[in-house]
Amino acid sequence: MQAPCRDTLLIVDDSELNRAILREIFYREYRIEEAENGRLALEVVARQKDRLAALLLDLVMPELDGFGVLEELARQGLLESIPVFLITAETSADIALQGYENGVMDVISKPITDPSIVRKRVGNAVELFRGRNQLAQLVEEQVQTIKAQSEKLRTTNASIIDMLSSVIEFRSGESGQHVRRIRQATRMLLQLLATEYPAYRLGAEEIEMVASAAAMHDIGKILIPDYILNKPGRLTAEEFEEMKNHTVYGCDILESIPFFQEQELFRYCYDICRHHHERWDGLGYPDGLAGSDIPLWAQVVSLADVYDALVSQRVYKKPYPHPVAVEMIRSGECGVFNPLLLGLFLRCADELYQALYLQDGEGKTHYTPPIGLRRSASYHPPEAQQLSDRTLALLERERQKYHWLSEMSGEILFDYDRQNDSVEFTEKYQEVFGDSLRILHASDHIHRAGQIFPEDLRRIERELQALTPENALYRTEVQLTVLGGQRVWFELYMRSLWEGENDRLCTGYMGKLSSIDEFKRESARWRQQAMHDYLTGLYNRQALETRVNAAVCDPARQPFSLLFVDLDNFKAVNDTGGHLAGDRLLREIAAKLPQKLRATDMVARVGGDEFAVFLEGMERKGLLAKKAGEICRFFGEELGHPSPGISASVGCVRYPADGKDYKALLQRADRALYTAKSRGKNQFALYAGEMEGEPYRPPLLFSTENELPL
């Protein structure tokens, strides 16, 4: 494939003069394309990207700047094949670094003082990219060649296997499906082994190779005489010894195929051919291998081969029913197998039988559905029975997928049947709650079990009744009691199921429980930190504002009062005892002041030595004055702090008389506080309209002393 000719240089600059200078430098070596902004540059790139040798890019441009162009080129993966030079008058090292981090090849400063050096720098980069692009193309061509050769080799190997397999089946008089079933059964068992036991490191390619090699397991029967191979009765001892030689004959045939020994497939074919009649207890042939000395793939093929021989018609026997064949293998009548593989086989035997034998015409007349799939003893025509069994098998497969997905997700899935009042859970439910996976009389059980608070249960039942076919989804959060008695938060997600005329009959619910306990606890911790002062543990200014706004927006519009408290002479405590002494005083206030208030009231620290008190339902001036006086006495007489001169001034406002929103109330409480301080401190003042005319300090700026982040 001929590489595109990269002979074009794209110059992108909003200055026509700059473009002309750059054109003059490079027009002898390249075709020149120009663009006056980033948007037009991308249009040129879209048309000429296979011909672009390099791109000279200005940084500051209208519509789309240089970094925007770089971002789009990176998104399209073009920076790997087109070198980009940033042409900029910026001298900042940060700009250059940002350019390099965004994928530019080099940064060239304007104005250009030495064109020959710039020409050489661009030329070197172009040659470097040309060489790299040619190398990448060469590598890609080699990869495609290798892939084609590999595919041809696989096709040749598959043809050899299919040809030899056909010869085996023709000579043995079998149905022509034996090899196909062995291949499929081997693949299914290996896939289950890979899923259940990742330590075996069975990849999809190796599984497919072993499945192909399984078709060669009986190739040695080509050299077995017909009178033995197709004998309808029991073989004599001498005949059986000759029959056993087919394992060795097969290996001889494989070794005689030219070039086959060099293929990885040969090892699997050889091991399977020689050892598929070995037994776990060492009583097999031809080498008497035991246990893990037998190659794993040979063990799998051995198990598949024995099962197929039992349930299939042979010249020397009639087929055994599927359940009988499984029981014979389980009980050891057919030899001893690897316990791990035997367990996997027993788990998937029903699915394997339905997938491989129901379509062949060899198992229809004697198939007995497994216990879990039986529906009725009544007669069905063969065609109807085949469809029913196949459908049941597919449903069982979907059930297994559903089960595996639930296990991997860690969620509890459930299915509630409203008609039978029963609910079924996945295994995670039993692990978390210690209860049965299937619960009859579920409604009564939920009310009696005590896993959910009664008020939550009533709420959920009420909300579920509001669901409709058009609005069938339901989601909520609820606390449940788990095994051990702990209350844990879960997210409950459900979908109602509807049937009947116009889908108006609710038949049940499907849903899941997902633990969100850690998330809820983490959120509560963050909410606690966000709404509380970390030094004192009191509410902070944000919490106060939230409480006031909630009261203002309450449709009932209940009255309340707001007290603004500022410590008098607090600076002296810091100056004499240090900030640690100030911290101790603030924490003491935080511990004792709420004791002077009702449980419905709120104390917040809103500044370094400033507090606010929210008094719910208190509007009368007399009561407000009494409470403000008590707070002043608390600071002046009851606090018990050894530092002299500690007291508090208090400004009081009422809602709605003194303000209709948080901002107005806080400003007027601050005016009242300023009035109290101007009258000599250690007292309170109720806001009055005439205070607006008094001299006033600047707007409140809370102190940052004593470690209060604002």
Image (cartoon, rainbow, N blue to C red):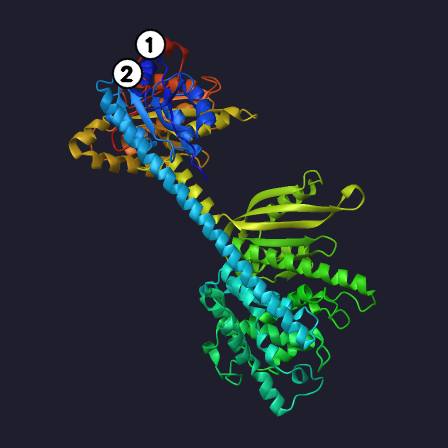
Which quarter of the figure is the C terminus placed in? top left
614 or 521: which is nearer to us? 521
Q: Residue 15 location in percent, x, y?
A: 35, 13
Mark 2 residue type: Ser
Quadrant assignment, res 579: top left
Q: Is residue 306 visible?
A: yes
What residue is drawn where x is 58% and y is 43%?
Answer: 476
Quadrant assignment, res 132: top left
What residue is drawn where x is 53% and y is 66%?
Answer: 210
| 18 lies above or below 604 | above
Q: Residue 562 location in percent, x, y?
A: 41, 25
Q: Which of marks 1 and 2 is nearer the N terminus?
A: 2
| 486 lies above or below 692 | below
**Residue 701 horizontal side relative to residue 224, left or right:** left
Q: Label 1 neighbourhood size at 10 Å, few (<14), some (14-19), many (20+)?
A: few
| 48 lies above or below 369 | above
Q: Is residue 434 visible?
A: no
Instruction: Look at mark 2 in the image and give the residue it sits on.
Output: 678
Q: How far is mark 1 from mark 2, CA to CA? A: 11 Å
271 or 199: which is nearer to us? 271
387 or 166: which is nearer to us? 166
Could you tell me which secondary element the residue under label 2 belongs to? helix
Are the residues tagged 1 and 2 within 8 Å (C-beta)? yes
**Residue 97 horizontal side relative to residue 150, left or right:** left
Mark 1 residue type: Glu
Q: Residue 262 location in percent, x, y?
A: 45, 66
Q: Residue 273 location in percent, x, y?
A: 54, 75
How many numbered discs? 2
Instruction: Look at mark 1 in the image and give the residue it sits on.
Output: 694
